[in-house]
Amino acid sequence: MFDVFYFGPKPNLFEFELPADSLEHAAELCRTGRYWYIYGGNDYTGFDFDWRNPPWENHHIHVFPSQWQRNGEVYLANTDTVQNQEWNFRREQKVRRLPERDKWVVPAGIDDSEFDYSWHPDRTEPDYEYRFPTQWQREGGPVYPGSAGVKYMTDQRIRAGATQIFYMDFMNGSIARHQYDVLKCDHPDIKLTRYVDSHLNVFKRIMKLATTEYVWIVSSVCDYTQFDFTWHPSEAQREMIHCFPSGNQRRGDTFYIHVPSFSQQMYDLELLDWFNVINYCDDQTVDRFSMPVHQYSTDNLVTEIKNYKFETPYAVFTNQKDLVLADSPCLWTKKDRTVVRISVAGATAIVPRDIKEDLRTQIYDYPYIEEAKPRLNDYLGGRDCLDIVYISNGEPDEERWYEHLCYMSNTSAKWVRGVNGRTAAYQEAARRSDTPWFFAVFAKLEVLGSDFPWFTWLPDYFQEPKHYIFNSRNPVNGLEYGHQGMIAYNKNLVLANNNPGIDFTLTQPHESVPILSGTAHFNQSAWMTWRTAFREVVKLKHFIATQPTLETEHRLATWCEVAEGDFAEYCLAGARDAVLYYNQVGGDYDKLKLSFEWAWLKQQFDDKYYNEIQ
């Protein structure tokens, strides 16, 4: 039997076993020429110390393996040749290394119940520091210390544990509370904190409550059914903010934060984006709970929003059925919580709860509206454009311009004809319309064809319901503005306008659209030309008296001074007669309204020009 020397714990295998500091030290103590040098932390059950190598290998150092390494720190050496270090790695038998947890650096908060601490390095390699992975990173598990650099291992991995969780409550109803209760079952230390104003302000409040080095900050608007809270960053990223996406939103609502690093910077931050480094992490994605969809059938999105009770940070407003959107707008600050126009007219939009503070008469009251290309067409009841309603009352060319309208618009326009009275005619047109707004085309208008956006123009649902007035060209004096132009009437406003003022359209909310709709051929007879000029100039005089503008004054001067073509003299006569009448009645509003009574107007004309035109 050869001498036996050991290092580490005493193996208690032989009465004559002695400690030695190294193979060379053991050689100095050896009395048998050859000797065993073994580590005392191995299990030698079944190991044969009477094993012998062939004589021609006596000068080798014979090395026996453990369950982990080819070098199990069991050596059979020769005192005369040990200094040559000629290693011979044997396979005939092996030992089992026993667990030695005290040799490891074990991170807090990990689940190492299945980790085998019997692992050991190969002492024929440099003295590396060996780092073991978690399920998420190549490090984060137990570390076997060393001084010759770092080596990342894959032999076994551990499951990291979860750290403290803070749950930002967006007050989004029972689903948020239910999820909190579920999370609390698995994470009893979870804390609930109400969301106010911005992510950054909530984070600052949380930092004062945190009791762990790292915290999770999660949101009640997200679904954590499949989320793994054992995730952790790599060592190189430990001081970053780690942000996980919410659905398709990169700037999500789930964060893993190093408390000391954030606390050091937070008082200098005005925006969360200013933090030194934010790691937008895609290891896991958290879906948001679906946004509620408010379907409405009115023409007034502003009123729908005013009357809606928000229970979530965002809601979808639409007049379309069965609409499903997968958007996840950013929630970090009020500036991020934008209104998102989804359809061209804005009838379908994603609207934040914050709008309630600013909304008065239009969505544009809210300062944060996303400028993005709309993704949906608006619902028009299966139509390609707004209804087109042609309104006539015995005009000489009504047939001609109706056929022209149908041809140029490539539609079968609806026709309202022979209805007595301006208000009655417009309201009949509104009743004929099956769309919330309709294009009203009057029988003197020669509409444009493809140059007019029949199939692309839509009213703006981000404003209150109103009428939209398109320009027309005056063939007599060359003016181009809304007079006699096509009008996109709001159906409900028209039906409600039973007592219009001097101008039916302008007595209700309206907007001028700088798009030319056609040429207004009002100069088809002396009577038609005169009455058109008279009525328009009465209105212009009234507007100059009540809401004067340079543009209105220019139009008035042009009507009174410029006229060419058929019946040009009656155009000038009608304009000047209107100025005279306005001055005679002193601008009395009720008397000005007489200009819209056909009988009165015809009497005025006949009194002056009947004999002249006979």
Image: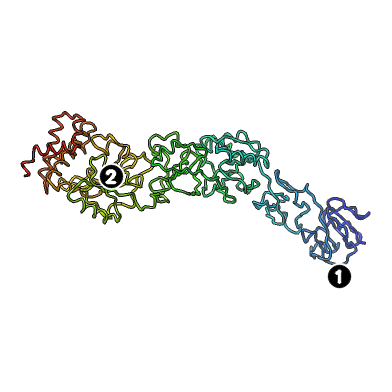
Q: CA distance from mark 2 to mark 1?
A: 109 Å
The residue carrying pointer 2 sits among few (fewer than 14), some (14 to 19) or many (20 or more) residues within 10 Å by Cα, namely many
Rendered residue at 77%/59% (across/down): 69
Q: Amino acid at mark 2?
A: Ile
Residue occupied by mark 1:
54
Q: Is residue 346 found left or right of 270 in the rendered image?
A: left
Rendered residue at 44%/38% (across/down): 305
Helix, strand or loop status at disc 2: strand
Helix, strand or loop status at disc 1: loop
Image color mode: rainbow
Residue 487: which disc? 2
Residue farthest right in this picture = 15
Q: Is residue 48 found left or right of 230 in the rendered image?
A: right
Residue 502: which disc? none
Q: Nearer the viewer, residue 8 or 223?
A: 223
Residue 267 screen position, x and y as percent: 54, 34
Q: Is residue 120 found left or right of 391 in the rendered image?
A: right
Q: Height in image: 281 above or below 300?
A: below
Q: Is residue 503 found left or right of 7 in the rendered image?
A: left
